[in-house]
Amino acid sequence: MIVRRHRRRVAASLAALTLVGGGARLDAQATIGWQRSAQLSANVWYGAAHTRVVSSEVEMGHTDSSFSVRATMRFGYADDREDNGPRQVTARSNEVTLGADYRPFDRYSPFILAGGESSFQQRIALRTSAGLGAKRTLLHKNRDDLSISLALLTERTVALEPPDSSARIATRTRWSWRFRYRRQLTPTLYVSHVTFYQPAVEHAATRYTVDATTSLEAAITSAVSLTATLRDRYDSESRSRGAPSDNDGQFLLGLRARF
């Protein structure tokens, strides 16, 4: 019954999001010059559900016809409790990604990327990666932007271990496939989806990660928007590091400010 109520609340939240917007307008195409934004999100459960989730994201970048550079920082936290017991941390993560594209508006565009993250729920003390690849733009019109990309990454993961244990270190060379689609549904409503599939070059069937994010954004003003975000992350090696599940997903509502 709780799961059903949660599903109804998600559906109601998405329906309500499509009704806001006023006269503000969102631009689905890349903006020339500097772009900055900050987003704060949280879960929407209440009543019998005791889980609390909060997430923040800060993005900054610059785009012109020759180069595009970007940086993203994310922080996530969740805790839960049983009955009237004390709250316990169930999730805590930090993530930083950096990237640069050469001639981002061309049909083919080479890029470099690097990143670092930690995740309590996936038992990652520190994961760093860096690589290079190329993007193929399949569609770029007034309301639509569709692209795929392929990169080769080198990755180093330090497992999160108990204090009295030595940390396990794993190095991987991975392919990184990305599919991204963005569409402006109305002048005030915008939807986007991006999926990363990153199999290891060796043992691709058993060592891989998938990161899929779907977002719906509705403008309140020219600078502030309501957001609904569904993010699902899968790491096939999480259980081997002691995590309770290989899957890590969340649905959040939030506010995004652009400045």
Image: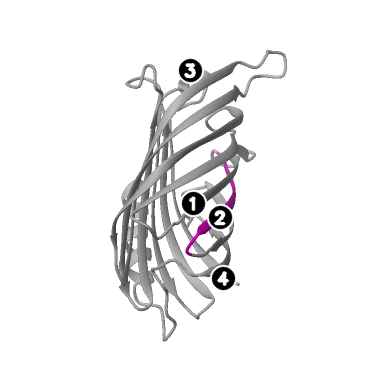
The residue range painted magenta reads 65-81
Name the element at disc 1.
Answer: strand
User: Which circle, 4 or 2, is nearer the viewer?
Assistant: 2
- Please report contact status of discs 2 and 1: CB closer than 8 Å, yes or no: yes
Compute the Cα span from label 2 to label 1: 6 Å
Q: Position of residue 242 (x, y in %)?
A: 53, 20
Relative to 40, 208 lies left or right: left
Lower position in the chain sequence, tag 4 or tag 2: 2
| Residue at x-position 60% and y-position 37% | 116
Q: Residue at x 56, y 70 (%)?
A: 258
Residue 162 covered by magenta stretch = no
In percent of the image, x 52 and y 57: which residue is there?
68
Q: Amino acid at mark 4?
A: Arg
| Residue 189 rendering spot, x and y as whole percentages | 36, 72
Residue type at numbered disc 1? Asp
Specify the amino acid type for callout 3.
Ser
User: Which is more toward the observer, 203 or 80?
Assistant: 203
Q: CA distance from mark 3 to mark 1?
A: 35 Å
List the residue tagged with mark 3.
Answer: 240
Give the amino acid at mark 2: Val
Q: Are marks 3 and 4 in contact (CB under 8 Å)?
A: no
Please give the residue where the numbered disc 2 appears in the rendered image.
69
